[in-house]
Image: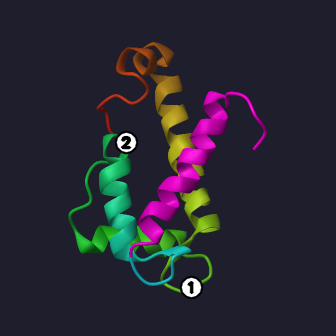
């Protein structure tokens, strides 16, 4: 990465990569999220948008929908598909609610769930 200050978007990309690896490195394959790591990531990093996952069945369904290669883990590509879906849903939600102002007021997130 070249010198100078990174843009907000560049910082967001770096944050996504670092967040994935912070959780994926906890156990097993350090390049994939196990169900327990995915659940912890969602509960710690996306709870304002998705709520807290408490039921194992919910984790199973999320993993099943993300796991394109059938290895019962979530690799980075599968994780990025998930991030794209969450981002798209947030965009639609904020667009329908006319919410650039809500994003500004809350510093980016807000407490509303999708």
The residue positioned farthest toward the left in the image shown? 54
- What secondary structure do most residues of the magenta stretch adopt? helix
Screen quadrant of the C terminus? top left
Would you say residue 6 sits in the magenta stretch? yes
The answer to whether 50 is drawn above or below residue 93 in the figure is: below
Q: Position of residue 35 (x, y in %)?
A: 38, 75
Q: Which residues are magenta?
A: 1-26
| Residue 67 to residue 83: above or below | below
Q: Residue 89, position in %: x, y?
A: 51, 41
Describe residue 23's horizontal placement relative to residue 91 as left or right: left
Residue at point 31% right, 33% down?
Answer: 112
Q: Is residue 60 magenta?
A: no
Res 109 quadrant in image? top left
Labelled pair 1, 2 in contact (Cβ < 8 Å): no
- The CA distance from mark 1 to mark 2 is 26 Å
Q: Is residue 64 above or below residue 88?
A: below
Name, please, the residue furthest toward the right: 2
Q: Which residue is mark 2?
A: 49
Number of numbered discs on residues: 2
N-term-proximal mark, 1 vs 2: 2
Label 2: state its secondary structure.
Answer: helix
Q: Nearer the viewer, residue 72 or 7?
A: 7
Q: Residue at horizontal 54%, vertical 46%?
A: 15
Left or right of 44 in this view: 14: right
Residue located beneath label 1 in the image: 70
Residue 96 image offset from top left, x and y in percent? 49, 24
Q: Residue at x 42, y 65 (%)?
A: 23
């Amino acid at each position: 990465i070249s010198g100078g200050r990174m843009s907000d978007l560049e910082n967001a990309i770096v944050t996504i990569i670092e967040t994935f690896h912070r959780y994926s490195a906890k156990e097993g394959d350090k390049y994939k999220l196990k169900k327990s790591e995915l659940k912890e990531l969602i509960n710690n990093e996306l709870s304002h948008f998705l709520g807290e996952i408490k039921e194992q069945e919910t984790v199973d369904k999320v993993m099943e929908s993300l796991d394109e290669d059938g290895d019962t883990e979530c690799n980075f590509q599968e994780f990025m598909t998930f991030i794209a879906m969450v981002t798209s849903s947030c965009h639609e939600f904020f667009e329908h609610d006319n919410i650039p102002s809500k994003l500004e007021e809350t510093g980016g997130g807000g407490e509303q769930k999708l």
